[in-house]
Amino acid sequence: MAKTITDNAAFLREAKEALVNYKETAAREEELVLQEKQQAKTLAAEKKAVEDNVSATVKKRRSELNAKYDTEISRLQDSVKKLRSQREKAKQKSMKERIDAQNAPFREENREMNSKIRGIFRQDRVPSFCNSTLFYALYYPRSAKEILILLVTFAVCCVLIPCGLYALLPQKRSLWLILIYIAVIVIFGGIYIIVGNITKDAHREALLEARQIRRSMEKNRKRMRENAKAIRSETSEEHYDLSEFDGKIREKEEERTSLESQKSEALAAFERETAPAIEAEIREGSRERLEALTAEYNETAAGLRQEQANLKEASLRLSDDYESYIGKDFMREDRLDALLALLESGQAASITEAKELYQSESSRK
């Protein structure tokens, strides 16, 4: 490149201008990158806020609709539960009346037999305590129940009481345990023998007769238990008038079924019509702001693309038009100014000479 000093100076000024332009373009590009990133973040946050608002509002309205129907359905379920409880109470009452009616003859017969026993005891002057299960278990045990009562009584008197008394003593000695057992045997054995003498031996015939009557009474009680068990185990409810309760229960259950069907239809209609309407309303309310943010973002993105193109063009211009001649090391504003000063002062006649002179002066420093 054969140029005059004036041409070389103009070339350096153009190179400096191109360098400044590249830096300014790069700065604008960097600013637009940050701006685009911030606007993209703001736009994304606004879109998310809209979506969250749509989701939360639809969820809340759906929940309110559910709660409305669930409250009514729960009320009907409580009514059915209450009616079933009333029905069961009515059934139990009727069942008890039926058991009482069926066992009435046996109870009456037992009352008569019990009166007969009292008459026998009065006539023979038998103590009234003899007409008890405990007495017959101790002196005339026959049934498994009476034998069990006898064994339990024996265990209490001969084991539990002596051991309990011995445990209460502050000092434990074998002799004291023996003395306690002797005392217990003497006391309870003596009572048993005395009671037996004044009752079993003195009124044997009356007691045996009463025992036969008591056995008949026990058979009646067994029949009454069997009757009660049979009635309670019946699966049929034909003996009890429960139709009024059944009608009310059926009515409430049908009402509940209808309400559950209405709930399903209402929820389907909500998803089909209401939810889209809510979404459209919320989106329309946010449309202008989203459009404004989108327009700002698009404008910034377009500006960024333009600046990136300008930056590319400026970079290529520096590389092709100036760096290839001046050299990359000298493509700095301070060095370009130094070369230009050397040319304008007449110390160098060309850019090459100016570069050599600059390097020579730099090395001396």
Image: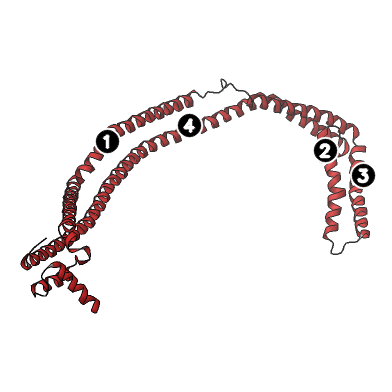
Local SS, label 1:
helix
Q: Nearer the viewer, residue 242 or 197?
A: 242
Residue at which label 2 appears: 148
Residue at which label 1 appears: 274
Measure the alpha-carbon separation of dots 1 and 3.
94 Å
Mark 4 or mark 2, which has the lower sequence index? 4
Quadrant for residue 107, please give it. top right
Q: Amino acid at mark 3?
A: Ile
Mark 3 or mark 2, which has the lower sequence index? 2
Local SS, label 4:
helix
Left or right, 277 with respect to 97, comes to left
Residue at which label 4 appears: 83
Q: Position of residue 334 (x, y in %)?
A: 17, 71
How is the structure coloured here? secondary structure
Q: Are marks 4 and 2 in contact (CB under 8 Å)?
A: no
The quarter of the rendered structure image containing the N terminus is bottom left
- Label 3, residues with CA under 10 Å away: few <14, some 14-19, many ≥20: few
Residue at which label 3 appears: 193
Residue 323 makes an appearance in the image: yes
Left or right, 149 with respect to 61, comes to right
